[in-house]
Image (cartoon, grey):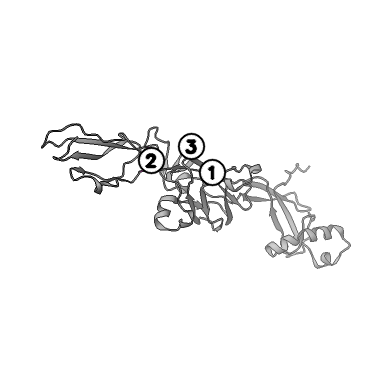
Amino acid sequence: MRTQRTPITKFSIWTPLSEDQLANNEDEEVASNAGADDDVKSNGGLPKMTDKQTRWVLQPKESKKLYVKFFSTKTGQQDQVLQFEIVGSYKGFNLNAKASCDFPTISQNPRNLYLNQKKSRPTTEPESFLSKTFVASENTFDFGPLLIGKDSEKREEIEVKRVNGTFFQITNNGKYDLEASFVLKSTLPVEEGGPTEKSPFIIEPAEAKLKVDETLNLQVFAFPEEAKLYKDEVICLLKDNPNPTMLQIQCLGAQPIVNVDHDVVKFERALIGKQPKQELVLTNACAIPVNWKLTGVDKLPEEFSVTKTTGLPKPPAPKKDTKAKAGDKVEI
């Protein structure tokens, strides 16, 4: 008694149609299969075939070409055994069929995607103000603080690109060539999850084709308009892959602000020949370095002098940058 055979679910055997079968339009089985195989012929240049035939008669020294097709709804390695029998013989013949099914994919390894990575963000300022760094604990790429009000149309200029631009390395690490498109979540309609406010981020290009192991430098820019935190997501869509890749990004808009500890520099009475000094403390009160400059110094009386008229204090620690001293002829 023949043992029960395992059903074949991932593979199927297809037989090319003979000229007589192709000419017989009244055969519904042939007609239906021939019509279904138009796609096979156009895609792979294969002959029209049927999968209904399960018995073959071979004359002495004759051979027949059969085709094995693979189909799966799950990714991964698929193995099955195709079993053949010969009439009049108790010996079977097993054909081991193996195939792999996968989606087109891109690398999601942060070491490959981003130029700079950090496990976690420092808790104190100014160390917590990172610049163009992927923070693993937040799963977010942070541009850091950026000056507000820059013109995004100048993003191809070298200096603007150095400060406001970066690139993500999109690598095809899958088994197939792929077609990718890139959009920002902020460009989606509100009903699809998009925000109600304008995003400061720009990505280029919008589409790309990548060979296996090929890498694209996806340009990403940030031009904040207000002094606040902006967040968005780069959505990578791959053709024939239903699972999009989401890359979270953020930047902090910053406006230059400097606080001065005195509104008025006042000197008390001083003896002739003495040089009293008063000190101003300028504090950077924002998240970016501030390039400050004192104006009107040239209009001061000759008894006064200023030791420093410009500076670039880093955030947010105070810096003693300006000192004014009275000359011998000062009368208070």
The amino acid type, in three-letter code, at marker 3 is Glu
Q: Residue furthest right?
A: 26
Q: Which residue is mark 2?
A: 257
Q: Earlier in the sequence, mark 2 or mark 3?
A: 3
**Residue 121 location, x and y as percent?**
42, 36
**Residue 161 location, x and y as percent?**
43, 54
> Can you say which quadrant of the picture contains the C terminus?
top left
Q: Residue furthest left?
A: 273
The amino acid type, in three-letter code, at marker 1 is Asp
Mark 1 falls on what kind of element?
A: strand
Q: Nearer the viewer, residue 205 or 46?
A: 205
Q: Give the extent of the magenta segment.
A: 285-289
Report the side of 46 relative to 28 (left or right). Answer: left
Q: Does 16 sit above or below residue 167?
A: below
Q: Earlier in the sequence, mark 3 or mark 1?
A: 3
Cα gap from disc 1 to disc 2, whole angstroms: 26 Å
Mark 3 falls on what kind of element?
A: loop
The residue carrying pointer 1 sits among few (fewer than 14), some (14 to 19) or many (20 or more) residues within 10 Å by Cα, namely many
Judge whether residue 286 is colored magenta. yes
The amino acid type, in three-letter code, at marker 2 is Ile
Q: Which residue is mark 3?
A: 138
Residue found at x 40% / y 57%: 158
**Residue 53 location, x and y as percent?**
79, 56
Q: Quadrant of residue 329?
A: top left
Judge whether residue 133 is colored magenta. no
Q: Which residue is mark 1?
A: 232
Q: Quadrant of residue 243?
A: top right
